[in-house]
Image (tube, rainbow, N blue to C red):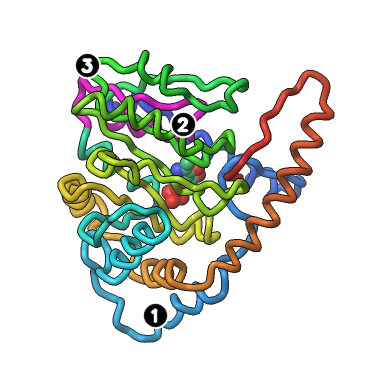
Amino acid sequence: MNKLSNRIEAIQESATLAMAAKAREFKSRGIDVISLSLGEPDFKTPTHICEAAKKAIDDGKYFAYPPVAGYQDLREALAAKYQKENGVPYKAENIVVSNGAKQSIANAMLALLNPDDEVIVFSPFWVSYDALVRLAEATPVLVNGGLENDFKVTAQQLEKAITKKTRIVIFSSPCNPTGSVFSKAELQAIAHEILKHESILVIADEIYEHIIFTGERVSIASFPGMFERTITVNGFAKGFAMTGWRVGYVAAPKWIADGCNKIQGQLTSANCSIAQRAALAAITGAIEPTNKMVDEYRKRRQIVYDLLKEIPGVKANFPQGAF
Ligand SMILES: Cc1ncc(COP(=O)(O)O)c(C=O)c1O
C-alpha cells in the first residue's frame, strides 16, 4: 500500500524550495528568470571563509565524525559572539550546531512539543515554521501583524492568542518575509507577556541579524528572565552568503540544548566537519564583506520600494532588514 505516514501527509512540500526548483527549470530552458523565492544572497561566500575550508581539507584532521553538538572551538566562538554582541551570557554548553537554521528549529520543536501543544506563529512568517510545527505533531496558531503596524504582532495580540495549550511562540526579527524588525520596546512588551506564563518558550529566529538597516539589533534572550525562556536560532546562510554550506545553530538553556543534541545524534549525527571550520572562520574573521553586502541590499531596498510604490493600488512597508 503506497501510503505515507499521517505526519508527512499533514505537511506541504517547502513552498520556497518548490518555487526555486521551478525557476531553475525555466532557466535551464533558456528563459530569463529573476527568482525571488529562496532567501539567497547572489554574492559568493567571502574568500577568507572558503580558504579556511580548503585548509581544513588539506590539514587532514577533519575527516572523522565531529562531536554531535559541533566542535568545541566553534561553540565557544558562537557563545562569545552572543555575549559580546547581543548581551546574552551563553556558554558553549548552550550551543548546538546543525545543518542549517532549519534543522535547528526542527530539533527544538521535536525536542519540546507534544501532540496537544499549540505554537503561536507571528504572521506573515517564513513558510517552514508551520510545517515544522506539524511535523512535531503540534498545532500552529497564526497571529497576523497588519501593514499598519509594519506587519508586526503586538503584545496585546499575543496576549489574546495565548491559551493553556500554548507551548512556544516563534518569530523572526529581522523578519522573512516582511523585513520588519522589532524595536527594543516591542520585544520587551512581548517578553513581559511571555513571562506571565510559566510554561511558554520563545523561538527567536535571528538568522537575518546582520542584514539590518536600522542599527537597532536586540535579542529577546537578553531581557531579565528571558534567558531561561528563549531558544535563539541563528546561522551562516544569510549574513555570510553561505546558504549551501548548511550551518545553523541554537543557543538555549542547557536542558533544551541537550534535547536538541539528543535528537540530532539520532537524525544526522552532526554538522559537516569542513562546513564547521568555514563557519569558525566566518564568526571570528572580518565582518567587512558582510557589511559590503548589506550596503548593496540597502540600495536594492530603495529601488524595489520606489518601484512598488509606483504601482497603483499597491501599498508596501519600508523594510528595516532581511532580503
Ligand atoms: C527566517 C528564516 N529562518 C531560517 C531559515 C533557514 O536557514 P538555513 O538555510 O540556515 O536552514 C530561513 C531561510 O530562508 C529563513 O528565512
Write the residue at 43% across / 71% down.
Answer: 284
> x, y percentage for residue 238?
52, 53
Residue assigned mark 3: 164
Q: Amino acid at mark 2?
A: Glu
Q: Position of residue 71 (x, y in %)?
A: 27, 68
Give the quadrant of residue 21.
top right
| Residue labelled with disc 1 | 57
The answer, for residue 259, to whether it is visible in the render is yes
Instruction: Tell me the quarter of the picture where residue 192 sits.
Output: top left
Which of disc 3 and disc 2 is earlier in sequence? 3
Q: Earlier in the sequence, mark 1 or mark 2?
A: 1
- The response on whether ligand 1 sits within 8 Å of label 2 is no
Report whether the residue tagged 1 is closer than 8 Å to ligand 1.
no
Say if 86 sits above or below 4 in the image: below
Q: Amino acid at mark 3?
A: Lys
Q: Residues within 10 Å of mark 3 (few under 14, many from 20)?
A: few
Q: Residue at x 64, y 38 (%)?
A: 319
Q: Tell me the residue that label 2 is attached to.
A: 186
Q: SS class of the residue under badge 2?
A: helix
* Residue ID at (73%, 44%): 33
The reply to whether the magenta stretch includes residue 125 is yes
Q: Say whether residue 132 is magenta.
A: yes
Kind of residue indicated by mark 1:
Ile
Tell me the quadrant of the picture where the C terminus can be found.
top right
